[in-house]
Amino acid sequence: MATGLEGKVAVVTGGSRGIGRAIAEELARKGCDCLLAARTESHLIAAGRQIADSSGRRVETVALDLRTAEGCSALHAALQDTFRRLDILINNAGATRGGDFLKQADGEWEDGFALKFYACLRLSRLFWQELSRRRGCIVNIIGGFARTPDPNFLIGGAVNAAMANFSKGLSARGKRDGVRVNAVYPGLTETDRVQELFENRARVLGLDAAEVRAMAIRKHGLRRLGAPEDVAKLTAFLCSPDADHIQGTAIAIDGGATADLH
């Protein structure tokens, strides 16, 4: 069955593991060729081979550090060296540290903003003209802490909130230039990153990580934690022609953990 994504080209940052890899797999399954970016080359190569083998699509990879302007420019150059066109940009890279606010140094805040926020900003700017020419789209994978601040995760909340505000503002520019811009707010999702979050929080609270995980599920009345594939399916839909009239929207995919509707 046609998906409307056949032959499209997607750039997926943080595409070697977790949610980013699941998004790349879903886009490739629906007919996209992909350029995956992350820092660890071995993880990238393994992900790229698996996705190409299972989907039959072309998958290129580039290992670089998107915390820097040079890394973002290198990803832009890598696209020109490979596909030379772009239809979809998925800004997914970025992880921030939880912990006791009073003990977190400035460098931890700077690192959190460098990868998740500034990479999103820089890549959107670098690829904007190409996306505009091809009537393409951007989907920013942000996180529920943008809406639900947590005293033990202040860096993530601040970074996510900034990224959310940027996405909304950029979508207004997108209406003028023909680029769809939307955001996804994953809740707690079964990834290595979330396990690390549980472990960090466990250290702060003096508990076991398994206890913190169970507490999180009970707190929000969830049936389960999210799966990367949940986020991937929603993201692929937002990239498809079926979502052509969705612009400037942020969608939570968290099993109902977010209590309000804004």
Image: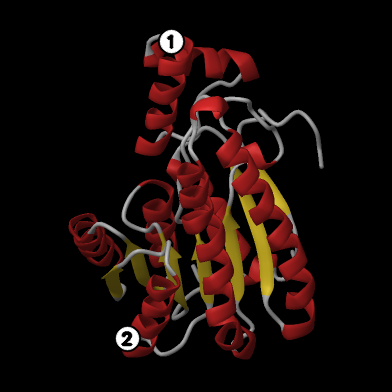
Examine the rendering and report whether any part of residue 92 can be seen: no
- Residue 21 relative to residue 85: left or right: left
Residue 210 image point, x, y percent = 39, 14
Spatial separation of the CA atoms under disc 2 and disc 1: 46 Å
Q: Earlier in the sequence, mark 2 or mark 1?
A: 2
Amino acid of disc 1 = Glu
Q: Callout 1 environment at 10 Å: few (<14), some (14 to 19), or many (20+)? A: few
- Residue 136 relative to residue 260: left or right: left
Residue topped by disc 1:
211
- Residue 202 relative to residue 49: left or right: right
- Nearer to me, 83 or 154: 154
Amino acid of disc 2 = Thr
Residue 17 image point, x, y percent = 33, 50
Residue at horizontal 76 percent and vertical 28 percent from the top:
259
Q: Quadrant of residue 169?
A: bottom right
Residue 39 image point, x, y percent = 30, 59
Residue 184 image point, x, y percent = 62, 51
Q: Quadrant of residue 198?
A: top left
Residue topped by disc 2:
82
Residue at horizontal 49 percent and vertical 27 percent from the top:
103
Q: Quadrant of residue 248?
A: bottom right
Examine the rendering and report whether any part of residue 251 can be seen: yes
Residue at horizontal 56 percent and vertical 58 percent from the top:
117
Q: Which mark is residue 33?
A: none
